Amino acid sequence: MESLVPVPVVLPLLAAALKLAIGGRLRRTQAFISVGTLAVVLAVSLALLVAADRQGPLVTNAGGWPAPFGISLVADRLATVMLTVSSAVTLCVMVFSQAQAYADQEQAAPLAIFHPAYLIMSAGVSDAFLTGDLFNLFVAFEMLLSGSYVLLTFGGTESRVRAGATYAVVALVSSMLFLVAIAVTYGATGTVSMAQLAERFTPLPGSVRLLVELTLLLVFVVKAAVFPMSGWLPDSYPTAPAPATALFAGLLTKVGVYSIIRLEALLFPGGPVGGLLMWAALATMLLGVLGAAAQTDIKRMLSFTLVSHIGYMVFGVALFSIGGMAGAVLYTVHHITVQTSLFLVAGMIERRTGTTSVDRLGGLLGLAPLISVLFFVPAMNLAGIPPMSGFLGKLALVRAGVADGSPMALTLVAGGLVTSLLTLYAVAMTWNRAFWRTPPPDVAGAGTVLEGEESPEDEEGSAGAEGPGDAESPEGAGGSGEHGGPGETHGSGEPRGPGEPGAGRARGTEGITGREIVTSVRMPPPMIGATAALVALGLSYTVLAGPLSAFTVRTAAELLARRPYISAVLGSGR
C-alpha cells in the first residue's frame, strides 16, 4: 500500500505535462485525461484513508533514501482525510469547469492552459498534505501557488490582474519568510525532516524554539488567512473564474490550517503560543463575520464567511486537547465541502442573472428553483443549523472549550456562538433579498450577452460585432441565442429600450477566459451535477456523523501522541 502514497502527487503532474504537450487539440481526449486523473487520485486517496486508519501511518521515501536523508511522504489519518476530501472537491470542480467552458465555447484555452495549471495546483495540495519534510512543504506551497497564479489571473482582465497582483505579493512575501524560517530551523537542528525535528526541538533553548515557532506560525497564518493576515482574501478570490474561486475557497486556506495543525501537534506540542492562537481565532471569527454581514455581493459575503470560519479551526488547535483537535479536523472537512459548493452556486447565479449583487437580484426561488435549493442547503449547513455537519463541528468545538474551562476558552465558546448567529443572519439576508423578494426590473433575462472587461464591443463601441453570445448557443448551454428580451440592461444597470444600441447586452460577468458569455435559464447538466454532488457530500457528513466523529477522535489522539508518526518515519526503534 505504501507504493500508492506518491500517486496523488505524481499522477496530476504527469497529466499536466501531457496536456501541455497536446495543447488545445484532442478536446475530448483532454477532458477524459483531466477527469480520469482526478478520479484515480480520489480512488487512491480513499484506499490510503482506509489503510492509514487500520494500519497506522504509511511512509514512502523518495528515491529510496531513508529519512532523515531523503524526503518522506507520510500518509497518516490527518493527511489522508484531508487528501480524500480535497480530491473529491477537485474532481467536482473540474467537471464544473469543463461544462462551463463548453457552454461558453471556450474549450481550447481552458484545455491548453487552465487545466494544466489546475492539475499542478492539485498536485501541490496533495504534496503539502503528504510531505514529511519541511523544505518539501515549501516546495508544495510553491507548486500550488504557481498553479493558482494562472487560475486567478486567467483571461487577463483588469480586475483579475489587479487581484492577482495583491495575491502574488502576499504569497511571495510569505514564501520568503518561509525560507528564512527553514534556514533558522536547519541552523538550530541540522535537519528539516519533521519527524526528526519533533525530537530535536525539545532540548533546544526556549527562546530558540519560540523564535522558530513564531516564524513558521506567521507563514502559515498568512496562508490560512487568519487575522490580522486575512485582509488580502476578500479582494482576491471573488474576481477569479467561478471554478477557480470555488477551489481556492475550499482548499488553499485549508492547506494553511493543515500546516498549523501539523506544526502545533508534531513540532511544538503544548507550546507557549496557545493563548496567542486563541486571541487570533476570536478576532478572525468575529471580524470576518461582521464583514460578511455588511456585504451586498454574494461572492464577497462568502469570502468573508470563509475568513470567519477559519477561526473555528484555529480555536480547536489552540485548545490542544483531543476534543479540540478532533473538532478542528471535523470542521475543516465540513468547511472544505460546503464553502466550495456555495461558490459554485454563486457562479451559476452569476451565469443565470449576470450578477451576484443582491441589490440587483430577486425572485430566484421562482426563476431558478434548483439553483435556489443548491444554495439554501449548504448555506444552512454553513450557519450550523441542526443536525447538519456545520452544527456537529461547532458542537464538538463548544464541548471541547467548555471542557477546557479556562476564561479564554469560554470566551471563545461565546465568540463561536455569536459568529454562528451572525453567519445565519448574513446568509438569511442574502436569501431574502436574492431569492424571495420580487425581482427588480433590471435582472438580465435569458439570452442577454454579458460582456467581459476587454470584449471587442467595449473597444469598438458597437453592438453589432459578433461574439460568442451572438453565435448559436452550444448544446446544453440552455441559452436561447436571441436578444431583445426583457431584463436587458445598460452597463450601469439601467434598462435598455428595444431600439437602443447594444440592446441585449449587460455588463459584469465573464467566462473562464474573461470573454463575454450569455445568460441562460438552463444550466449545463454537468455543472448542476457537480454542484449537487458536493452538496450531497456535505449532507453525508450528517448521515455518517458517528463514524466520522470517531475517526476524528482517533486522528486527534494520533496527532497528540506523536510517537506513531515519528516511529513510522524514522523506524520503530525511535
Image (tube, rainbow, N blue to C red):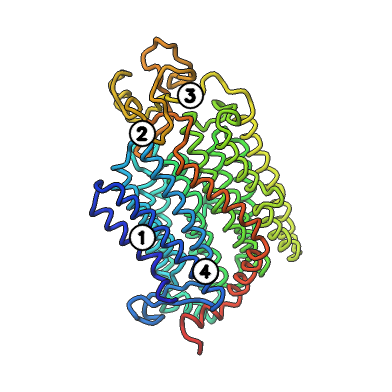
Q: Amino acid at mark 2?
A: Pro
Task: Tell me the CA gap for discs 1 and 4.
Answer: 19 Å
Q: Residue furthest bottom?
A: 573
Q: Amino acid at mark 1?
A: Pro
Q: Residue furthest top?
A: 499
In the picture, residue 324 is in which quadrant?
Answer: bottom right
Sequence-first disc among 1 and 4: 1
Disc 4 + disc 3, Cβ < 8 Å: no
- Mark 3 or mark 2, whichever is nearer to me: 2
Above or below, 348 relative to 150: above
Please give the label number shown on residue 49. 4
Q: Amino acid at mark 3?
A: Ala
Residue 400 lies, in percent from the top left, at: 71, 63
Task: Tell me the CA gap for discs 1 and 2.
Answer: 29 Å
- Mark 4 or mark 2, whichever is nearer to me: 2
Q: Residues within 10 Å of mark 1 (few under 14, many from 20)?
A: many
Sequence-first disc among 4 and 2: 4
- Mark 1 or mark 2, whichever is nearer to me: 2
Left or right of 212 in this view: 431: right
Task: Tell me the CA gap for discs 3 and 2.
Answer: 19 Å
Sequence-first disc among 3 and 2: 3
Identify the element where label 1 is drawn: helix
Q: Residue at x 62, y 29 (%)?
A: 433
Identify the element where label 3 is drawn: loop
Disc 3 + disc 2, Cβ < 8 Å: no
Q: Residue furthest front?
A: 475
In the picture, residue 143 is in which quadrant?
Answer: bottom left
Residue 20 lies, in percent from the top left, at: 26, 53
Residue beneath disc 1: 12
Left or right of 529 in this view: 275: right
Residue beneath disc 2: 474
Please give the label number shown on residue 391. none
